[in-house]
Amino acid sequence: MIGATVEVGEKIWDPMDMNRWVPADYAREAELANGRSAMLATVGWLWPATFGTFTSDDVTTTDPIDAILQADPQWWAQFIVLCGVFEFWKYQKKNEGCSYTGGGEPAVDYLNLYPKDPEARKTLEVQELKNARLAMIGIASFLSAHFIPGSVPLLPDGF
């Protein structure tokens, strides 16, 4: 399985022994899905402070948590519907035999960036998993630093 690398002792990383209740493949799919969300969240957290915001009368702050609260409920409804459409599409592609987590023909590869060589695919999938894990730790540290000032040594108060 992808992710059983030297950092985790060449085995599936499962410190809480969750594989007794959850199949490892399902847990890996969830880890990748959450990791991809964390990668987007990290960019969304850093972008407004670095590059500014879009012109808007609704959201007037660069503070990510305050911006969530300022967003119009209609926007959130549209966002939830869009997420549902993506999840349905992923489900349909999985039923067609495509993969959105690696290990098969990709569900989306418009630019033909996914390598044909199996070894290069494995390398790319391990890189994505490691970046996803780092992003999950990163966004958790941003949230901690925001709500508990001084809890993350390298982040300033109010981050």
Image (cartoon, rainbow, N blue to C red):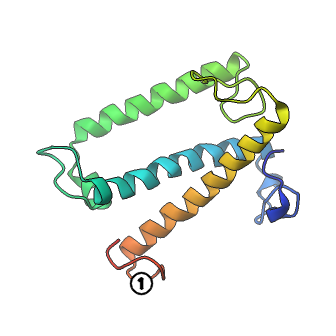
| Side of 65 where 132 appears, left or right | right
Q: x, y (%) of residue 120?
A: 79, 37
| Quarter of the figure with residue 146 | bottom left
| Side of 91 where 37 appears, left or right | left
Residue occupying the far left of the picture: 57
Task: Evaluate whether residue 21 shows in this view.
Answer: yes
- Residue type indicated by callout 1: Gly
Q: x, y (%) of residue 153?
A: 48, 83
Q: Which residue is drawn at 38% across and 57% down?
A: 45
| Quarter of the figure with residue 103 | top right
Vertical side of 55 occupied by 136: above or below = below
| Side of 37 where 145 appears, left or right | left
On-image quarter of the C terminus = bottom left
Looking at the picture, tell me which residue is in the foreground, 77 or 21: 77
Q: Which residue is drawn at 36% across and 35% down?
A: 79
Q: x, y (%) of residue 112?
A: 63, 23
Q: Which residue is drawn at 19% across and 50% down?
A: 59
Task: Evaluate whether residue 23 shows in this view.
Answer: no
| Side of 117 where 111 appears, left or right | left
Give neighbour class at mark 1: few <14, some 14-19, many 20+ (Cα, 10 Å). Answer: some
On-image quarter of the N terminus = top right
Residue occupying the far right of the picture: 10
Q: Residue at x 80, y 61 (%)?
A: 17
Q: x, y (%) of residue 139?
A: 49, 61
The residue at which mark 1 appears reads as 150
Vertical side of 112 occupied by 15: above or below = below
Q: Is mark 1 on a helix, strand or loop?
A: loop
